[in-house]
Amino acid sequence: MPKVTFITQDKEAVVVDNVEGSLMEIAVDHGIEGIEGDCGGVCSCSTCHVLVAREWMDKVGQPEDIEKDTLEFNPDVTPRSRLCCQIELTKNLDGLVVEVPSTL
Amino acid sequence: MSELHDPFKEAKEKGPILVAEFQGEKIPMILKLKDIREATKDTETYSSDAPRRVPIPSEEDVRTVRQYPLEVDPPVHAEHRKIVEPFFLRPKLPEYEKKLNALIDRLIDEALERETLDVVHDFAIPLQSHALTYLLNVDEKEAELWIGWGIHVFKDGDGKSKGPFMEKYSEQMFLAAEKNPGEDFFSALNQAKFDGRKLTMEEKLGYANIAFAGGRDTIIHTAVNIVDYFAGSPKGLECVREHPQMVKTAAEEFFRVFIPLTHIGRVCPHDTNVHGHEVKAGGRVSLCWSSANRDPEVFKEPNEVKLDRKPNPHVAFGFGPHNCLGAHHARAIMRSLILKLAERVERIEVLRTIELVEHEKEYSRKVGYELLEAKFTAR
Ligand code: FES
């Protein structure tokens, strides 16, 4: 099963191996600070904001309109921003690296 | 289940706003989700710096204080919000969750023991009042008094606002906490600093005012509407029982369709053209959350309840800097309620109801019930 690396707000790399499914749920289950997932993944709360590592942007792809509009909740959106409840970790994304943006 | 009624459906088909009259004031209601989200972010055009006038109809005759942090704009808004935020994050604590589950278990026990119950007064109001003691970290006994404030502090059944009484009570709580400080909401506000100084009593009362009034009718109606929904849809209850992980999407869907707060206001500090309607400086605009939550451009079959709806970018808790501080509390309560009902209740029968309808000139909207007599059958 795929693995994913979260770069935390303290710039530490947390590697989570052998997981699948919603990236938000993976992050919450592993206590990654700064990813809250308040709405449970329905794209309403925007508390699951991550920055996709540059080299992974193509593979992860761009957000759909619904996600884009919700993302704007965050004042600190960047072109690398995604709501990780909308990213499914599949074999295709094995090795994915995402950063948790630091809060202001 | 049949389609739910959307009182703003026709208006939305005609255009982005509905101009409605409230207490003689003509207010354009912004109806579409995207437009509302835009407006919440533009706090210079759509300001919240309007004491007692952010709610529509305004609350000028039911309270004397400005509500914090609701009725201030960024950037000071963030500082006000920070003062009370730790309390509103308490629903994430395991000890809070434990207490909440025990409370809901107790209320379900009582409901099952009775022949019938009024879900509003015998279930939802005690639920809201007791849960609030966990949020504010005060003695649970206080809930007994709050229960008497009814569904809505400012406009409950007997037509008399409990607003002045609530302000007096809050003042006494601040004074008592001054003498006997603890870890509660009142003590924290007594000690809090804003801009390097202590808060004035008026400011503290403003925080307490929204803590008591804001999450009250909203939680009560949502809980009652959920019970009512499951009475009409035993399949839904069964579905959650079989797939408890569905509780999160189910709760969000209930927040979307049952949002008790029809809308909230903003004030335009300058003359503003709101989607073709001129608002003079000082005039108000409505952000109509309940209409946005049924926007067909965003939600497929917007008037159907789909317990597994995803994505579901509703604005039941608002959007932007002022998004609802009580959202964690509401989510914790409703998720626990849904799971416990599924786990413990086989069937709910509704025997008698009195609907609570918001009647305005241009629309009527059912927000919940004044009474909902039901019978719960145990599994
Ligand atoms: S968890 Fe709420 S938007 Fe992702």
Image (cartoon, coloured by chain):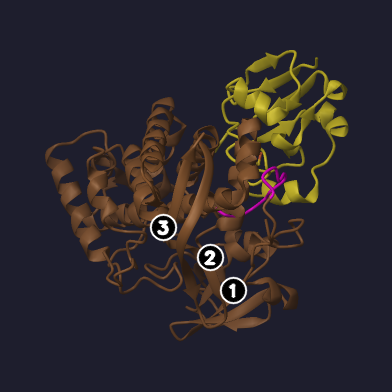
Chain colours: A yellow, B brown
At mark 3, the secondary structure is helix
Q: Is residue B185 visible?
A: yes
Calculate the distance from the C-alpha at mark 1 to the C-alpha at mark 3. Answer: 22 Å
Can you tell me which quadrant of the image ligand 1 is in? top right
- Residue furthest to the bottom in view is B24
Q: Which residues are magenta?
A: B306-316
The residue indicated by pointer 3 is: B217
As drawn, B294 above or below A46: below
- Please, what is the dominant secondary structure of the magenta stretch? loop
The residue indicated by pointer 1 is: B29
Residue positioned 55% across, 67% down in the render: B46
Mark 3: few, some, or many residues within 10 Å (few <14, many ≥20)? many
Amino acid at pointer 3: Asp
Residue positioned 75% across, 62% down in the render: B296
Instruction: Tell me which numbered mark, 1 or 3, is placed earlier along the sequence.
Output: 1
Mark 1: few, some, or many residues within 10 Å (few <14, many ≥20)? many
As drawn, A89 above or below B113: above
Depth order, front residue of A30/B378: B378
User: Dots 1 and 3: beta carbons under 8 Å?
Assistant: no
